[in-house]
Image (spheres, rainbow, N blue to C red):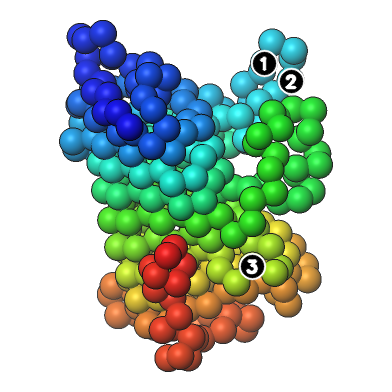
Amino acid sequence: MKTIVVKKGTNVDRISKAVELVDDGGTIIVFPGKYVEKLKIKKSLKIYGFDPEKTVISYCDHAKKVDEAGAEYGTFRTYTLMLAAGNIEIKSITVENTSGPGEIRGQAVALHTLGDKIKLTNCILKSYQDTIFLGPLPADLRERYQSLLPEDELIDLKNARVWIDSSTIIGDVDFIFGSANALFTNCKIKSQREGYVAAPSTPEDQKYGLTFLNCVFEGEGEYNTYLARPWRDYGKAVFIGCDYGKHIKEEGFHHWEDGRESTCRFHEADCRYVDGAEYKRVGYIKELSAEEIAEYTAENLFG
């Protein structure tokens, strides 16, 4: 194992160069700076910054960008950082996609995960539409994109575990989405404007989907943002002990397509609006029992 330091003005002044040099299982220390890079990491690594406000990985690919063959990028080639291996740990770094709003640029992913046991702590993840994609792709998209995406991005990864802790996530439409078993603890979830926060595509036979524990949801305006909508049938999102700003709609959730009211798995427990307002959720939301709440721990979801 090996430790590589990335610092502006040195021989290793890009994170991509450090990834090439470091051994699998090694550590990369990133000094403050703005690193304009598009990264796909296929090694099990630890990558540590010093301060997420000052240590930034930034890129600006977007869905409407056209490649050399004349094809639009679509969503899943737009990432700034793809973590395409298991056992990766990221700390104290910002990952941003600076393309801009979705109505102008389309989807613009900042972080794309495609591995098991990925953990981020004290990070800032920022874009507009589709900030974080938590792979794998749903089965129908793995089929559709066989000629567009490389084979290693089309894998059927069962119950991929991702844990994002004490971090800030910024976006507007479906900005936390995907099929992984993803746990968010003590995070600030900030809506830049009206939209939808989570869009799970959890497989039917997967117990856990997108889980938010003790998170704070912030945004502008009143009652203009949904907590979640199911990107595919059986999408699952759970909210426990969360605080909501007034931007969260009283009904809370949207079914996206007719029929998904009966298949989506959306649950809440011990959540509240910060101003004490009461809310009336849509009828297909299930309150969790004390026994069910007790199952939602980091040990069970990520251990």
Task: Tell me which residue sits at (47%, 23%) in the image.
Answer: 38
Which amino acid, by three-letter code, is at mark 1?
A: Asp
* Position of the N terminus by quadrant: top left
Residue 240 visible in the shown view? yes
Mark pair 3, 2: CA separation:
34 Å
Q: Nearer the viewer, residue 274 or 145?
A: 145
- Which quadrant of the figure has residue 76? top right
Kindly identify which residue carries mark 2: 71
How crowded is the residue under tag 1: few (<14 C-alpha within 10 Å), some, or many (20+)? few
Q: Is residue 79 above or below residue 277?
A: above
Left or right: where does residue 123 sit relative to residue 280? Answer: left
Q: Is residue 131 above or below residue 261?
A: above
> Which label sits in the foreground, 3 or 2?
3
Q: Are marks 1 and 2 in contact (CB under 8 Å)?
A: yes
Mark pair 3, 1: CA separation:
35 Å
Kindly identify which residue carries mark 3: 206
Task: Tell me which residue sits at (47%, 33%) in the image.
Answer: 43
Which amino acid, by three-letter code, is at mark 2?
A: Ala
Instruction: Indicate the position of residue 156 as horizontal and vertical percent values.
Output: 69, 49
Mark pair 1, 2: CA separation:
5 Å
Q: Are marks 3 and 1 in contact (CB under 8 Å)?
A: no
Kindly identify which residue carries mark 1: 67
Q: Nearer the viewer, residue 225 or 138?
A: 138
Q: Find numbered disc 2 in the image and state the secondary structure of the residue it sits on.
A: loop
Q: Earlier in the sequence, mark 3 or mark 2?
A: 2
